[in-house]
Amino acid sequence: MTDNRPVYLNLIKIRLPLTGIVSFAHRISGVMLFLFIPFSVYLLDLSVQSAESFAAVQRLLDQPLMQAVQLLVLWSIAHHFFAGIRFLLIDAEIGVEKSQAQLGAWLVLLAEVIAMLLIIIGVYS
């Protein structure tokens, strides 16, 4: 007789390979981007109402917490973009082998780090 009971998985002890981490982060970044849409639409609507409301949005976005949120959203965009290209290539059966998949995952991480550095340098210099 087979045992059909659920298996306990300790998620803390499971070690995902780099390709799994990139895949998981792609999903997380997509959810974050989706959840940020209402707030960004609200800020856009508020900023185009008048000059005073535009200044209020600028003051809001200049706060340190909001700058951290902006960096998080920009990371989400960068990661989702580069990982999405990687997954499109995988769908076209390019980079499917294990070594190629690992290289692709490293390239995604490298590309997003470079993009974030360029954004940070461009904003704060």
Image (spheres, rainbow, N blue to C red):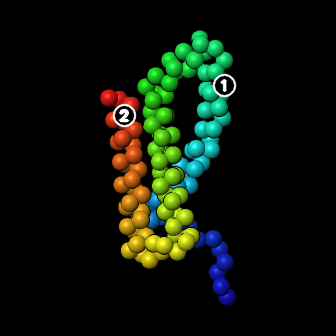
Residue found 38% across the figure and 60% down from its top: 107
**9 relative to 57, above or below:** below
Residue type marked 2? Gly
Residue indicated by mark 2:
122
Quadrant where the C terminus sits is top left
**52 relative to 32, above or below:** above
> Percent position (x, y) of residue 59?
50, 17
> Percent position (x, y) of residue 103?
37, 67
Quadrant where the N terminus sits is bottom right
Residue found 47% across the figure and 55% down from its top: 82
Disc 1 crowd, CA 10 A, few/some/many (<14, 14-19, 20+): few
Disc 2 crowd, CA 10 A, few/some/many (<14, 14-19, 20+): few
**98 relative to 50, above or below:** below
Quadrant of the rendered image containing residue 42: top right
Residue indicated by mark 1:
45
> Percent position (x, y) of residue 7?
58, 71
Residue type marked 1? Asp
Q: Is residue 65 left or right of residue 28?
A: left
> Percent position (x, y) of residue 120?
37, 36
Q: Is residue 4 left or right of residue 114?
A: right
- Residue in front for this viewpoint, 54 or 29: 54
Q: Earlier in the sequence, mark 1 or mark 2?
A: 1
| Secondary structure at numbered mark 2 | helix
Residue found 65% across the figure and 32% down from its top: 41
The residues bearing labels 1 and 2 have C-alpha atoms spaced at a distance of: 26 Å
Quadrant of the rendered image containing residue 19: bottom left
| Secondary structure at numbered mark 1 | helix
